[in-house]
Image (tube, grey):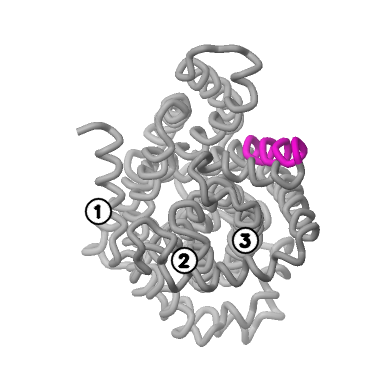
Amino acid sequence: MSFAEITNLFVSLAWGPWLVFLLVGAGIFFSVFSRFIPFLNLKKGFKYMFQRDHSSEGSISKYEALSSALSGTIGLGNIAGVALAVQLAGPGAVFWMWVTACLGIATKFFTCSLSVMYREKASDGTILGGPMYVIKNGLSSKWAFLAYFFAFFGMIGGLPAVQSNQMVQIISEFALPILSIESQLIFNMLCGLIIAVIAGTVIIGGLTRIAKASSWLVPIMGGLYVLTATFILLLNLGDVPRVIQIIFTDAFSGTSVAGGTLMGVIMYGIQRGAFSNEAGIGTEALIHGTAKTNSPIKQGFVAMIGPIFDTLLICTATALVIILSGLWTSNEYSGVSLTAMSFEFFLGNTGIIVVFLCVVFFGISTIFTYSYYGSVCARFLFGPKGQKLYLYIFIATIIFFASISLDSAINIIDGSFAMMAIPTLISSIILAPKVIALAREFLLNEDSL
């Protein structure tokens, strides 16, 4: 069995209908059980984002935690992932990405509040949070196996598979013809090596350096991307209602997806939505659990606005441009290339340059964040020495993933994310009453905190 066949089998087993029901069902449960507290308090996320709390422990600020988490989600999942969703499952998949994002608001509130509630301080002073610490410190010892289960797949899910692969793809389309390098494999490995060196200078510096880099990269590149997409939509404003109608119609037809089933549209849309905003996967909790805050609920409010930016804003902008271009109906382009060609369709070389810059910088910033995700999971399993070793392995895999197929790269991460969602959502559902009790107390005494 080839490597591609192994990864395809892995993701097909991991992403069954049961996982879709778990992700969506958990989001509905959190929304209803909380009596829609997250949705009724959306403004508080923006209010607390830049607030500095006195007498609070943590490694990075609330904004740095959000921007670091967003650098992991506002990345190639929003550029390459959306293109794959539209091309393989049709425009209707975008609707189910929206559903995932809306439910993800409530899910992130719970998972990230819990990450702060049950984080711990290591002997060297490092603040450690995430689903494995929620399970370890919040549940009885009989649930401990779920903590190790999450950490194991977190090390795999944190690898830079899609980022390295898609960055090299768009760089090769620009540079390969100019440099006249005959071997695609050699070019890919050289690009991977350069990316590894650049990323390594930040990654080895730890979470603080990652957060500082993300805090300025994310708003600049995110703003450039959204403004460019908005300009395209304004130029074609008359066609936008038709595109939105196509999305809603196709969401319940299943005619565009391979095999022509409605479940195929729903599953692929939710799968790509999960990759886009990571709500319920547990990765975002690894970062938000380290924030400087005097209340877990404050960080939960900040964390829950993530899906608004990464899925409802950036993914939607990408999808509308791709559908407007009509290029998604052909098999000539895939992944990031489809997005780049769609922007070029409307803006010429300017469109390609914008996508190129965003892919490179989003890709780099996402690699920064993913390195932390995987390394903190390695630390949970193997201690500080294991964490350092993982970082060097992580940097080396950038070269490997630059040289494999996009399908294999996507499958590795999607399958791992599916496995990570199981312990994250089970522990969050069990401990949900603890979050609600603390949230009600916080809202009653908010002015004094």
Is 274 in front, or is 441? Answer: 274
**Quick check: 32 left or right of 201?**
left
Q: Position of residue 207 (x, y in %)?
A: 57, 42
Is 444 in front, or is 409? Answer: 409
SS for dot 2: helix
Pointer 3 residue: 316
The type of residue carrying mark 3 is Thr
Residue shown at the point (63%, 13%) measured from the top left: 179
Nearer the camera: disc 1 or disc 2: 1
Q: Is residue 380 magenta?
A: no
Q: Earlier in the sequence, mark 1 or mark 2?
A: 1
Q: Earlier in the sequence, mark 3 or mark 1?
A: 1
The type of residue carrying mark 2 is Thr
The type of residue carrying mark 1 is Leu
Tell me the quarter of the picture where residue 441 sits. Answer: bottom right
Pointer 1 residue: 13
Nearer the camera: disc 3 or disc 1: 3
Residue shown at the point (38%, 52%) measured from the top left: 417
Q: Quadrant of the N terminus?
A: top left
Residue shown at the point (52%, 68%) measured from the top left: 95
User: Can residue 99 be seen in the rendering of this structure?
Assistant: yes
Packing grade of label 2 (10 A; few <14, some 14-19, many >=20) is many
